[in-house]
Structure formats: structure tokens, C-alpha cells
Image (cartoon, rainbow, N blue to C red):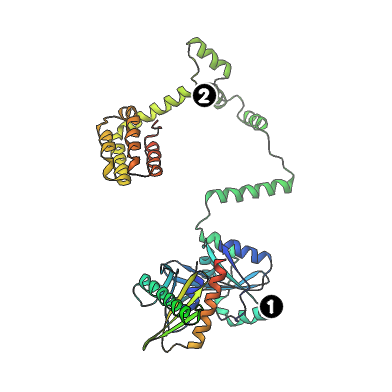
């Protein structure tokens, strides 16, 4: 863009979108300059007129090509960490600059461009929009949402005593035993409620059974992890892992595994060993000690 | 960090490379159009500045702000830019006055960026 040379007012660092937001809210008159390196070094300029984005251009320095207008501003809005130079202009200078740079005029609102850049709207944004619409309609016509009891009544009234209604009732009873019924059953068969530790054990043993199928894969991954992180000194640790034939065996030898790793503290920094142990724990789903 | 400065200087016609290095010669940021090894160039730019500092110190117990080195084909401009050293390699036919102003501006901007 052809812009008048004025004195640099200030330099801002941070997310481009945020910096632009502050300029928009302060109804800024002037232009900003930002440079960034993606595939090659690029220099971008955006012209503001009383807080509105009027024109934008991105110049690719090496290839000496330019992108103008909406395409330029949408690319600039993807910048995360950048340094923006802010140059002030008076309203007449802005007017002239806009006349000269007709090619770079931005037509679409920047916010809309950002949404376009982030591809198609995801389900959550669609849901949010629908929810807002619903709320607006309800407020407009003074409708209050029905309670759960009311909904149940409406359903019962509509299906009456038909076979479907009976079936639904039965299935509800079967699927949801009350607390009293549950306790009765537990008493009858002498079952105690499991405590937290037992639940944890049950989950881990269940996971263990699942892992057994892929144990060889896990073993391979662990060996690769250890050798890649600590190289040659990992010989002992690797031999421990290799000696395991099942997930349970690996769990039994986990303390031995940790000891062998910790003994390498003479050669490898403690932090690195701790990180490796944490990664192994994450892989096997259990603490080593 | 210094993309703005480098982009501005490369925008001056005839500029072939811009290098920002620390006083030890380590490359901080650079961009060149047809010069090969940026790290070597950055180290050489720092070397020019350090040698000039030595000479300046011995001759007039002063420190250099701006150094120009002219060859047959190219002109090398070196300037202090805050804690760093800014070097520009440009064609000898490049408008020297304009280039000098741009390099000085860039050095001032580099100081602002470092704040």
C-alpha cells in the first residue's frame, strides 16, 4: 500500500487480533505494520479509519508478490505472536490513503473473516447459536420451559395406557432399581460395596486384561522409549522389560525397573530420569513405586 | 522479533541481506536474497563492529555507532542496535543516503523492540 510516512507512535507485542481489537475499540485513525515469517518473510499493512479496518495488504518480500483486502486481513488474523508498529494519521490522510489504495479495500467485517478462516462452524457454535435463537423466541412470546414432571405428564397423556406406555414403564423399572432395592439385593447375596481402592484395582486389572493383547506392542514401545531417551546405559532397563512375558509380570517388576533407572543418575541428569519414569508410568497406566 | 526491521530494510532496492547478531557474533535473526550462509555473515558483521570498536577505542577512546565498508560491488553497513549489531549488505549502486537513513531508523526500532 502507498501510505504517508509518519512517525512511529508505538510498538505493540502480542496476538494480532487482540491488538486490532484495542485499536478498533479506541476508534483509531492510522495504519499498522506487521512482519512475519511463514513460508517466507512477509510484511503486512492495515489501514484504520475511526476504528474501522479500511484496507490491508501483505507483501511477500522475496517473491515480491502481494495479497490485498479480505484475503490479506484473514491471513493477518491468524498471527499469534507478533510485533505491530502503529503509525498515526489524521482523518484526511486516511481518506487520501484509501483513495490511493483502492485495490486493498477490505469489504467483509474482520470478525466474520476470522470465522471463515477457522473453516466451517463446529457443532458447538451451531448449538450455541440455536440456543440463543430459542431463548430469544421464548423471551419474545413469554414462554417458560416446562419442568421434567410436566413433560412426563404430557407424554403419559399422549400415549395413555397403550402397550408402548407399559413397555416404557417396565423398561424404566428394570433399568433403574431404587436405592432400597439395590441395598436389599446386596444384603440378600452378602455383597459388600467396594471401597475406592478396590474399585481402582478392578479398573486397573480390567485395563491390564485389555493390555495383555497388545503387551508385545507395549513392550516394544517401552524399549524404544528407554533407548531413545538414555541410549547405551539403558541396557539393564531394557533387559528387565524384555524379560517380562505379561503385563502382570511387568507390574511386578516395576520397582526393579525404577531402581535400574534411578541407578543411572551418575550418567544422566535426575530430571531426565524423572521425566522418563513419568512417561513409562503413563504408558503402563500405573505408578512405578 | 526483528521481522519488521528486516522486512523494512529488504524493501530498500539493492539490499541483499540483513543480519542481526549479538556482540559475540551469534546470529539472532536474518534474511538474505542471494547470499548463502547467514550464520557466517552474521559473525562477520559482528567482527567488523568489534574490530571498529577496537580501532575507535585506540584512536579516540570512543565507540562506533555506524560503520560503512565499501567494496567494488557491494557496500556493507554496520550499526549498533541496542544490545545487538545490525548489518546490511547492499549493492554499491544503492542510494547510500537513503540506505543510511533506513539503517539508522531500523537501529532505533530495534532498540524499541528490545524494551
Determine if residue A67 is in view.
no
Location of mark 2 (residue): A175
Give above or below for A222 relative to B62: above
Residue displayed at 47% across by 80% down: B56
Q: Which residue is mark 1?
A: A91
Camera-side residue: A53 or A280?
A280
Q: CA distance from mark 2 to mark 1?
A: 71 Å
Quadrant that contains the C terminus of chain B: bottom right
- Give the image quarter of residue A45: bottom right
Who's the residue at 63% across and 28% down the image? A156
Q: Are marks 2 and 1 in contact (CB under 8 Å)?
A: no
Viewer-closest of A41 and A263: A263
Residue B30: give x, y in percent of width and height.
Answer: 43, 71
Q: Is residue A164 visible?
A: yes
* Kind of element beneath mark 2: helix
Residue A36 drawn at (x, y percent): 48, 68
* Residue A251, image quadrant: top left
Residue A81 vertical placement versus A124 (above, below) = below
Q: Does residue B15 lie above or below B113 as drawn?
A: below
Q: Tag 2, which chain? A: A
Outermost residue, right side = A142
Tell me what residue is drawn at x 69 percent, y 68 percent: A27
The answer to whether A98 is drawn above or below residue A124 in the figure is: below
Amino acid at each position: 500500500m502507498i501510505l504517508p510516512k509518519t512517525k512511529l507512535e508505538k510498538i505493540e507485542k502480542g496476538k494480532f487480533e487482540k491488538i486490532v481489537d484495542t485499536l478498533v475499540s479506541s476508534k483509531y485513525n492510522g495504519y499498522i505494520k506487521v512482519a512475519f515469517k511463514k513460508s517466507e518473510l512477509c510484511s503486512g499493512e492495515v489501514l484504520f479509519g475511526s476504528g474501522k479496518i479500511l484496507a490491508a495488504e501483505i507483501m511477500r518480500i522475496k517473491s515480491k508478490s502481494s495479497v490485498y483486502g479480505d484475503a490479506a486481513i484473514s491471513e493477518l488474523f491468524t498471527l499469534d505472536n507478533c510485533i505491530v508498529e502503529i503509525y498515526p494519521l489524521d482523518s484526511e490522510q486516511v481518506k487520501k490513503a484509501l483513495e490511493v489504495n483502492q485495490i486493498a479495500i477490505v469489504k467483509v467485517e474482520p470478525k466474520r473473516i476470522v470465522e471463515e478462516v477457522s473453516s466451517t462452524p463446529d457443532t458447538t457454535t451451531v448449538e450455541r447459536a440455536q440456543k440463543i435463537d430459542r431463548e430469544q423466541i421464548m423471551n419474545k412470546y413469554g414462554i417458560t420451559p416446562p419442568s421434567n414432571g410436566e413433560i412426563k405428564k404430557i407424554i403419559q397423556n399422549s400415549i395413555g395406557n397403550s402397550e408402548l406406555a407399559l413397555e416404557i414403564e417396565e423398561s424404566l423399572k428394570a433399568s433403574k432399581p431404587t436405592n432400597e432395592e439395590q441395598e436389599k439385593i446386596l444384603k440378600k447375596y452378602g455383597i459388600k460395596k467396594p471401597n475406592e481402592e478396590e474399585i481402582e484395582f478392578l479398573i486397573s486389572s480390567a485395563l491390564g486384561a485389555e493390555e495383555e493383547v497388545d503387551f508385545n506392542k507395549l513392550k516394544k514401545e517401552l524399549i524404544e522409549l528407554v533407548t531413545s531417551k538414555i541410549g547405551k546405559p539403558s541396557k539393564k532397563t531394557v533387559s528387565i522389560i524384555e524379560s517380562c512375558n505379561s503385563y502382570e509380570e511387568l507390574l511386578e517388576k516395576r520397582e526393579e525397573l525404577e531402581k535400574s533407572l534411578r541407578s543411572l543418575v551418575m550418567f544422566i541428569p535426575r530430571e531426565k530420569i524423572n521425566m522418563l519414569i513419568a512417561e513409562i508410568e503413563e504408558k503402563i497406566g500405573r505408578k512405578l513405586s | 522479533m526483528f521481522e519488521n526491521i528486516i522486512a523494512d530494510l529488504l524493501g530498500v532496492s539493492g539490499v541483499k541481506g540483513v543480519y542481526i547478531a549479538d556482540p559475540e557474533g551469534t546470529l539472532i535473526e536474518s534474511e538474505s536474497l542471494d547470499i548463502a550462509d547467514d550464520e557466517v555473515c552474521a559473525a562477520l558483521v559482528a567482527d567488523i563492529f568489534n574490530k571498529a570498536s577496537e580501532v575507535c577505542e585506540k584512536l579516540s577512546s570512543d565507540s562506533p555507532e555506524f560503520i560503512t565498508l565499501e567494496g567494488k560491488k557491494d557496500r556493507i553497513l554496520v550499526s549498533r542496535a541496542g544490545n545487538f549489531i545490525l548489518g546490511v549488505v547492499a549493492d554499491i549502486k544503492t542510494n547510500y543516503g537513503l540506505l543510511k537513513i533506513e539503517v539508522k531508523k531500523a537501529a532505533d526500532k530495534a532498540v524499541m523492540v528490545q524494551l
